[in-house]
Amino acid sequence: MRLLKMLCSCAVFVCLLPACKKNDDNSTPSKKPGTYYQLPQGNAAFDQQILDWYKKYDTYVLYRFTEKEFKYGITGFYPQAVLCKTADTTSMPAAINFLKNYWFSFYTDDFLKKYLPFKILLAGLMMESNNGFDTTNIPVTRPMAGLDYIIIPNVDSNFNKMSGQQRQTLKTYLNIIFLKSLFFGSSDFTPAKLIPPAAFFEVSPYDKKGLTDTDKYQYGFLALATDNNNQLVVPGKYDDFAVYLETIISTPEWKLSATLLSTTTDTNGLIRKKYNILIGFFKEQYKIDIRAIADKQD
């Protein structure tokens, strides 16, 4: 069965590094045991914020980095051709503000300390190859997750000129790839860190045959998969979970209430039941309201 297409793609492999330990000394760090990268990377006001995040979350936010930080794999340089330039420092105040307001603000400090990637790479222009090896000719426009990092492209001189819609799009993709990397892993070498709630998989009949796009909603499915004969079939459990997660993160609650969660669409109440299970799971387990991600429209 062909899996449902994910909204975000995973990045190339990078060097597997052990988790660093947070140092209790609040002074400006130099290169010291337990520190993998020199912080701060500069002396601007945003460098202090990056340093504060390192102390608080044990995560390196890097705007200056080398190719090996995103391209080096477990057995050497990963062959896929990727061109990556580092961020434009004039955009850094806007980029740091974006991380704070459109990523970190949705989660508790405990969650961020435990689950943020080891590195957050702020990149400028990123290009990849359409065949994996030769000329890099395809712009990378979405954040990507690698072995120990999330990389954000296009942190350039136009970053602080983003339209409201562009900001919403980046927010959506960034939070989707962050959470999906936790539930599904970001590569073959990084296992999942979170487990979906078992109750979610007890609502819809995953063995149901003969469903169509017309009747999928009454069984609690937001999207169907296709088999090798290009026939519609029930999605796999984890594909179904991924679609719900993406839908909640990308769609404001008012819009869901008027469409997918309405009694007109959700005739048997199964979509709302799975929706409530997922919302409740994040609230009860992690004190997070994931609806706030899509609801933030400013």
Image (spheres, rainbow, N blue to C red):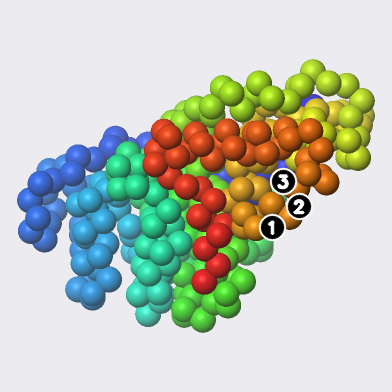
The spot of residue 139 in percent (x, y) is: 63, 64
Q: Secondary structure at mark 1?
A: helix
Q: Is residue 42 left or right of residue 78?
A: left
Q: Quadrant of residue 238?
A: top right
Q: Secondary structure at mark 2?
A: loop
Q: Residue at x 10, y 46 (%)?
A: 24
Rendered position, 206 above or below 134: above
User: From mark 1 to mark 3, how far is it between C-alphas?
Assistant: 9 Å
Give the residue type that dot 3 points to.
Leu
Residue visible at 59% across and 23% down in the picture: 199
Where in the figure is residue 143, as x and y percent of width and height? Answer: 53, 56
**The disc label shown at residue 259, or none:** 2
Relative to 288, is 295 above or below? below
What's the residue at 88%, 35% (across, down)? 215
Among numbered discs 1 and 3, the one appearing first in the sequence: 1
**C-alpha separation, residue under disc 2 versus residue under disc 1:** 6 Å
- Camera-side residue: 162 or 69? 162
- Confirm or deny contact between disc 1 and disc 3 (CB under 8 A): no
Where residue 261 is drawn, which disc sits there? 3
Which residue position is annotated with label 1? 255
Give the class, few, some or many, for how many residues have Cα within 10 Å of label 3's Cα (few <14, many ≥20).
Answer: many
Is label 2 in contact with label 1 (beta carbons under 8 Å)? yes
In this rendering, position of residue 242 left or right of residue 107: right
Badge 3 marks a residue whose secondary structure is loop
Horizontal relation, residue 119 to residue 266: left or right: left
The reply to whether discs 2 and 3 touch (Cβ–Cβ < 8 Å) is: yes
